[in-house]
Image (cartoon, rainbow, N blue to C red):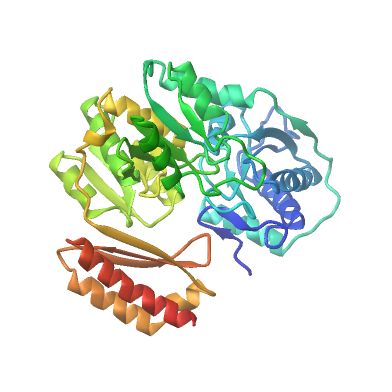
Amino acid sequence: MRKLFGTDGVRGVAGEVLTAELALRLGRAVTQEAAARPGRRDPARPASPVRVLVIRDTRESGAMLESALAAGVASAGGEVLLGGVLPTPAAPLLLGRYGFDVAAVISASHNPYRDNGIKFFGADAFKLSDATELAIERRLEDEQTGAPERIGRIQTLHGTHEDYLRALHSRFAGLDLGGLDVVLDCANGSTHRAAPEIFRRLGAEPIVIADAPDGRNINDGCGSTHVGALADVVVAGGHALGFAFDGDGDRLLAVDRHGAVVDGDELIALVALHLRRRGLLNDDGVVVTVMTNYGFFGAMEAAGIVCATTRVGDRYVLEELRARGWSLGGEQSGHIIDMGFVASGDGIAAALLTLEALAGADLADRDAMEKLPQRLVNVPVGDRDVVMAAPELTAATHAAHAGLAGRGRVLVRPSGTEQLVRVMVEAPTAAETDAICARLVAIVERLCA
């Protein structure tokens, strides 16, 4: 059976990998799976249809996939509510508010506009488990398209943008941003309306860039994957700080007034210390991933905060947070999850939480952690699994790791969403870091030649 789901749903080039036909079949399969879930049916409404929320980002292929996915849900007897363009974290928030069985987000996050994806949240407001995704894939494999008992309806759900803004305002009502000199980079994506609006409601008058999506400019030289554009604006304008979101609004990176990038590790450290001081860090614990900088762990240990580590992917951070009953976790890439607000990375909420933690202090003066020099290179490959299985790469990785024992580390892994091999090295000096990384990258490139 062909595996469709990666670490963040089904993703690929729109119209080639992620076609309208596949979106329709996914809509049908996820509806059938939700209908079969034990305990879903309301005894008072035994024939109640599966209700599915669909939201999307600003890609030009979004409307096509939205229509196809909705048709698939309706063809299986489900009811579809179209929520329009919204950040990903709005999906789990709206699930609880309206009692949906499933929420679907059409987005390829930080990828270029040609890509798109579909990820699903269950009725519990968490991303679907590996087991549920496997069950959906089996339904696709054994698809039977007999006539349903009824044809579902497709409707527009009005007011979703305001619902999301109200949730943010309720959580951060005590945060006064009056006089804040901040730049927001909305990546021409799904935060382009919500981010500036909530900052204004909290008293700020933000400078906003990359807030004019045209379907093709999402993440194009802007946003959290191209944070240099934001840094240039912050430095040139003499602004205090800036925040960069990604295409679907579930990631955040920041820059200080000098243009230095503040990644997810530093932001999580800053927030963890803040929440612990306020007694809001459950069990004084935080969940991060294998990509997290060594300096983070030292800072947390010094502060009496326990760290749990997972594989890369916000879904795995979420699983660990649920298992431990902890409230805070995230990734170096900028997914920051505050379970007290929503069970998802939320870039806008993370920006506000960062400002809450700073309490008026200068981001440039942050001292939550000291980072070890790190080098990360994404190497395009033809087949990431073949490259990762090569004995030459395995041996070189082990040798590099042994050479850094007790001083740093090496991590070579395949991307979960793209044909890339990611090479990451941390060492005591930048020169040693770069040298080791260059050797490993050269091996990956040679294996692809």
Q: Residue furthest right?
A: 147
Q: What residue is rendered at 32% in x and 72% in y? A: 438
Q: Quadrant of the N terminus?
A: bottom right
- Relative to residue 61, is residue 159 depicted above or below? above
The answer to whether residue 136 is left or right of residue 167 is right
Q: Residue at x 24, y 24 (%)?
A: 278
Residue 26, placed above or below residue 193 = below
Residue 30 place in picture, x, y as percent: 67, 49
**Residue at 19% in and 47% down:** 370
In this rendered view, identify the residue nearer to me: 174 or 184.
184
**Which of 28 and 194 lies nearest the eye of the viewer?**
194
Residue 227 in view in this figure: no
Q: Nearer the viewer, residue 325 or 313?
A: 313
When asked about the image quadrant of residue 176, the answer is top left
Tell whether 430 sits left or right of 26. Answer: left
**Residue 303 in sight:** yes
Asked if 79 appears above or below 443 in the picture, the reply is above
